[in-house]
């Protein structure tokens, strides 16, 4: 509606930015134009690191312990190894304590669920991350939903992801 009215006046806008004066008369009411904004990913990441880092420093200086992240990796998938390593490096950089549980590929589903349940009730664990993919004999959805939503770092629990 807003876009359509502006086009009639000879203005083109996407509704979020200031209208652009143009000599163009457009018959398509749905035509919109947005100014592109280049996202500096490195800067955004750096800002997030800095923000989290000072949050953790603040917690520790108040006498609280640093957050503790537990990563669970099952099997020897090399890519998963790199991702887990990157995540522990990121945690280190921020001052978050991290622990990796690396289980063999033939770990049963019930053993994995027991570990997750143990971590769920451990007051010294704040966040749990189960690295995917899991071996074929393990039902990923079941494991992801076993992590309590409050400690679900990835947001893969059905309540966090927002769909079944
Ligand atoms: N528990 C989880 N397991 C898995 C996840 C996840 O988010 N949580 N995602 C993938 C693996 N993964 C992280 O663990 C991951 C894979 C790929 C990327 C990514 O951004 N790739 C970019 C390249 C990024 C770069 O070059 O720096 C791309 O492919 O374009 C991020 C994370 C499965 N398992």
Image (cartoon, grey):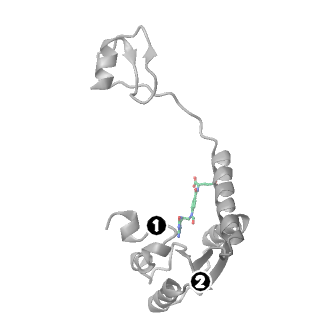
Residue at image location 46% in from the left, 66% down from the top: 155
Circle 1: element type: loop
Disc 2 under 8 Å from ligand 1? The reply is no
* Mark 2, other Cα within 10 Å: few <14 / some 14–19 / many ≥20: few
| Residue carrying label 1 | 155
Mark 1–mark 2 distance (CA, rounded to whole Å): 20 Å
Q: Residue furthest top?
A: 23
* Label whose residue precedes the other's in the sequence (1 or 2): 2
Can residue 90 be seen here? no
Q: What's the mark number on residue 56?
A: none
Whole-percent x and y of residue 57? 70, 65
Q: Quadrant of residue 6?
A: top left
The answer to whether 149 is drawn above or below residue 41 in the figure is below
In this view, the residue in front, 58 or 69, is 58
In this view, the residue in front, 11 or 68, is 68
Whole-percent x and y of residue 83? 63, 67
Residue at image location 63% in from the left, 47% down from the top: 44
Q: Quadrant of residue 163?
A: bottom left
The reply, left or right, for residue 46 in relation to residue 31 is right
* Mark 1, other Cα within 10 Å: few <14 / some 14–19 / many ≥20: some
Which callout, 1 or 2, points to the residue nearer the camera?
A: 2
Whole-percent x and y of residue 87? 64, 67
Residue at image location 64% in from the left, 60% down from the top: 52
| Residue carrying label 2 | 124
Q: Residue furthest left?
A: 1
Whole-percent x and y of residue 78? 64, 72
Looking at the rendering, the quadrant in which ligand 1 lies is: bottom right
Can residue 63 be seen here? yes
């Amino acid at each position: 509606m807003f876009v359509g009215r502006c086009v009639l006046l000879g203005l083109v806008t996407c509704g979020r930015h200031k209208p652009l004066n143009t000599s163009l008369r457009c018959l398509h009411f749905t035509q919109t134009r947005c100014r592109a904004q280049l996202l500096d990913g490195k800067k955004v990441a750096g800002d997030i690191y800095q923000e989290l880092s000072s949050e953790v420093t603040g917690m520790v200086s108040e006498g609280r312990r640093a957050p503790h992240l537990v990563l669970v990796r099952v099997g020897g998938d090399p890519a998963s190894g790199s991702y887990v390593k990157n995540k522990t490096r990121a945690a280190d950089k921020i001052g978050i304590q991290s622990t990796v549980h690396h289980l063999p590929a033939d770990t049963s589903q019930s053993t994995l669920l027991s570990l997750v349940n143990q971590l769920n009730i451990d007051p010294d664990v704040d966040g749990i991350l189960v690295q995917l993919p899991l071996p074929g004999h393990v039902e990923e959805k079941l494991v992801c939903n076993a992590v309590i939503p409050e400690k679900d770092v990835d947001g893969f629990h059905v309540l966090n992801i927002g769909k079944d």
